[in-house]
């Protein structure tokens, strides 16, 4: 056989082996996925609180997760429909339904506990919502679920209290109340129940708990691994503090039907368009 032909064939075999090796190495490199939880904490606090969760998901799935902490609700709402802005989110019912029905996001799990919000104070026991007319109420900014529900409590602008949307977290709203800067605060009911000196003025209806959603761009096998990891998260001692902080005991499977219609709570906010 021609010597030059043998050399060429040998070189081709080496190139094929090298290409196969590079392909195998590339396929083993973990993809990178962004996780953007709803901004119920200031960015610095969110990074500390969610860091164990991101590390846990990376460990359990073999993928890389990057925590993206939106600065506030205004930015979060403005960017919600922006294409390719995140792969995973943790959202209350109104945002979850919006992402599911309009953007094709897939709910993987939700908190076992439902969500409701309570308007609480240190006084006005038994006096009802009317007692807070013209009073100051601490809340997180619009369009958080608490703010949206507070607006439903007082649909008449003439009788509406002053919404003080300066709280940087729901716990911060309670502290603002304790400091005497406001007359009441709206907070998640589970959080209110951890303060025995808070008086319930009014509690909203229940909604399905916050859901962890995956973008339609996330491969099905990755979604399945993330779901499986979250369903057993309650068994992880290192994650107990996270569960305590967000007021849940465990995650359970979630379905789109549970959230259907919840986005109507967003209808009163700038930028919302009916389908």
Image: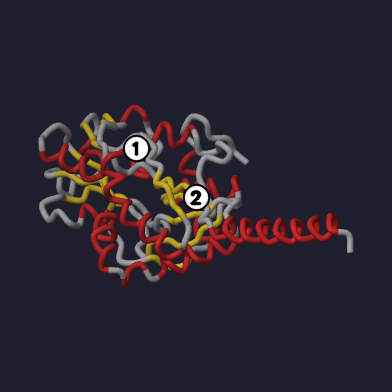
Give the alpha-carbon distance from disc 2 to disc 1, as whole Å: 44 Å
The residue positioned farthest toward the top in the image shown? 158
Given residues 102 and 225, the one toward you in this image is: 225
Q: Quadrant of residue 82?
A: top right
Circle 2 sits in a helix, a strand or a loop, which is it?
Answer: strand
Q: Is residue 198 left or right of residue 273?
A: left
Find residue 107 and report its horizontal and vertical position in percent.
51, 58
Given residues 274 and 108, the one toward you in this image is: 108
Find residue 245 and report its horizontal and vertical position in percent.
25, 55
Q: Residue at x 50, y 39 (%)?
A: 80
Q: Which residue is mark 1?
A: 154
Picture quarter with the N terminus: bottom right
Q: Is residue 147 above or below residue 189?
A: above
Given residues 39 and 30, the one toward you in this image is: 30
Q: Residue at x 21, y 52 (%)?
A: 192
Q: Is residue 120 left or right of residue 146?
A: left
Q: Is residue 79 left or right of residue 245?
A: right
Per the rendering, the mark at residue 32 is 2
Could you classify mark 2 by the number of other residues whose Cα lies within 10 Å: few (under 14), some (14-19), or many (20 or more)?
A: few
Find residue 157 and report its horizontal and vertical position in percent.
36, 29
Circle 1 sits in a helix, a strand or a loop, which is it?
Answer: loop
Picture quarter with the C terminus: top right
Tell whether label 1 touches label 2 (CB within 8 Å): no
Given residues 62 and 85, the one toward you in this image is: 62
Nearer to us of marks 2 and 1 is 2
Q: Residue at x 34, y 34 (%)?
A: 141
The residue positioned farthest toward the right in the image shown? 1
Q: Is residue 263 above or below residue 15?
A: above
Q: Quadrant of residue 241?
A: bottom left
């Amino acid at each position: 056989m021609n010597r030059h032909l043998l050399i060429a064939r040998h070189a081709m075999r080496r190139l094929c082996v090298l290409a196969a090796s590079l392909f195998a190495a590339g396929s083993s490199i973990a993809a990178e996925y962004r996780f953007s939880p709803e901004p119920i904490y200031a960015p610095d606090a969110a990074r500390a609180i969610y860091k164990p969760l991101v590390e846990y998901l990376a460990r359990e799935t073999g993928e890389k997760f990057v925590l993206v902490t939106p600065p506030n609700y205004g930015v979060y709402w403005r960017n919600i429909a922006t294409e390719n802005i995140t792969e995973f989110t943790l959202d209350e019912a109104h945002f979850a339904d919006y992402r599911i029905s309009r953007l094709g996001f897939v709910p993987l799990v939700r908190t076992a506990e439902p969500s409701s919000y309570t308007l609480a104070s240190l006084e006005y026991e038994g006096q009802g919502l009317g007692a807070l007319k013209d009073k100051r109420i601490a809340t997180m900014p619009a369009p958080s679920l608490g703010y949206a529900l507070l607006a439903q409590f007082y649909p008449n602008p003439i009788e509406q209290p002053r919404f003080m949307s300066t709280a940087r977290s729901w716990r911060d709203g309670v502290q603002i109340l304790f400091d005497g800067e406001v007359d009441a605060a709206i907070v998640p009911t589970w959080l209110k129940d951890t303060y025995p000196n808070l008086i319930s003025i009014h509690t909203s209806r229940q909604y399905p708990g916050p859901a962890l959603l995956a973008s339609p761009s996330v491969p099905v096998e990755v979604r399945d691994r993330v779901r499986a990891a979250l369903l057993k998260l309650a068994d992880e001692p290192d994650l107990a503090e996270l569960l305590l902080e967000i007021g849940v005991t465990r995650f359970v499977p979630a379905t789109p039907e549970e959230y259907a219609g919840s986005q109507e709570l967003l209808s009163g906010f700038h930028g919302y368009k009916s389908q």
